[in-house]
Image: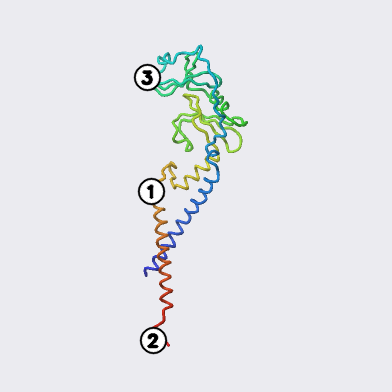
């Protein structure tokens, strides 16, 4: 097979394969730029955290918690459901204590997780389901488990993930975020954990696109050369 014919065949088939992925790059890129990133993050779903004065009178000294949390390294005072609590860091991990009595509150129950989620939810939808998960789904695969998963009714299925150890909101998800995550997977071609932007498959397709462009440029120049040769007068022609 002549070199131009071989180059044309290679160019055609590689371009077809690359064009399919290029369509995915274009469509997913349009979605990821059209939907504002603040909407994707779900900021509107969470009530703003307003600072409220908290009286220290009658509160347990943080040092007294060391007998209940070995290797205590820090204790952060905050308010949850209108009550003062300590979020403690210790050798055994994080824990939640009542700041007035020193009683350990974690792990929190289903009802407590629901109440915390509702108190932070900025919309009017009711709780549809609450689930204690010990294996993180794909949408929160980088978060430590276990977690309380609280889903609300409403557009885009808003979902809060609550820590059973601290009662805090770990993250939130909704269908626009899930669509973004799927689009991101197609865009970077990481079909496993959707995080590696320099994976092997993406590099292969990148070089295939380079080969397509290079072979196309060579074929274009070759076609010009053939035309010039065809137009040259034959020596001795009358």
Identity of the residue drawn at 58% across and 38% down? 156
* Viewer-side label of 1, 2: 2
Q: CA distance from mark 2 to mark 3?
A: 101 Å
Determine whether the residue tagged by mark 3 lies in a helix, strand or loop.
loop
Determine whether the residue tagged by mark 2 lies in a helix, strand or loop.
loop
Q: Nearer the viewer, residue 121 or 44?
A: 44
Mark 2 lies on residue = 236
Residue 215 as seen in the image, left or right of residue 122: left
Q: CA distance from mark 1 to mark 3?
A: 44 Å
The extreme bottom residue here reads 238
Q: CA distance from mark 1 to mark 2?
A: 59 Å
Label 2 Cα crowd, 10 Å radius (few <14 / some 14-19 / many 20+): few
The percent position of residue 72, horizontal first and vertical second, equals 39, 19
Q: Nearer the viewer, residue 182 or 89?
A: 89
* Viewer-side label of 2, 3: 2
Task: Say above or below: 76 vs 125.
Answer: above
Identity of the residue drawn at 57% across and 36% down? 157
Mark 1 lies on residue = 200
- The image quadrant of residue 48 is top right
Numbered disc total: 3
Mark 3 lies on residue = 71
């Amino acid at each position: 097979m002549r070199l131009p014919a071989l180059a044309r065949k290679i160019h055609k088939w590689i371009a077809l394969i690359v064009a399919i992925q290029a369509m995915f790059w274009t469509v997913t890129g349009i979605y990821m730029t059209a939907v504002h990133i603040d909407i994707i993050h779900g900021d509107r779903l969470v009530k703003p955290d307003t600072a409220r004065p908290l009286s220290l009178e009658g509160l347990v000294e943080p040092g007294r918690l060391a007998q209940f949390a070995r290797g205590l390294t820090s204790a952060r005072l905050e308010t949850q459901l209108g009550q003062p609590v300590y979020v403690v860091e210790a050798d055994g991990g994080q824990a939640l204590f009542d700041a007035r009595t020193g009683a350990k509150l974690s792990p929190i129950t289903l009802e407590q997780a629901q109440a915390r989620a509702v108190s932070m939810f900025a919309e009017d939808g009711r709780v549809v389901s609450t689930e204690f998960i010990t294996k993180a789904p794909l949408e929160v695969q980088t978060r430590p488990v276990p977690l309380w998963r609280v889903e609300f009714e409403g557009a885009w299925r808003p979902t809060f993930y609550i820590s059973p150890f601290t009662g805090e909101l770990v993250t939130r998800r909704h269908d626009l975020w899930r669509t973004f995550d799927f689009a991101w997977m197609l865009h970077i071609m990481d079909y496993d954990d959707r995080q590696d932007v320099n994976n092997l498959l993406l590099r292969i397709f990148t070089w295939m696109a380079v080969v397509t462009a290079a072979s196309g440029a060579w074929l274009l120049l070759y076609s010009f050369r053939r035309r010039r040769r065809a137009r040259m007068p034959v020596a001795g022609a009358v």
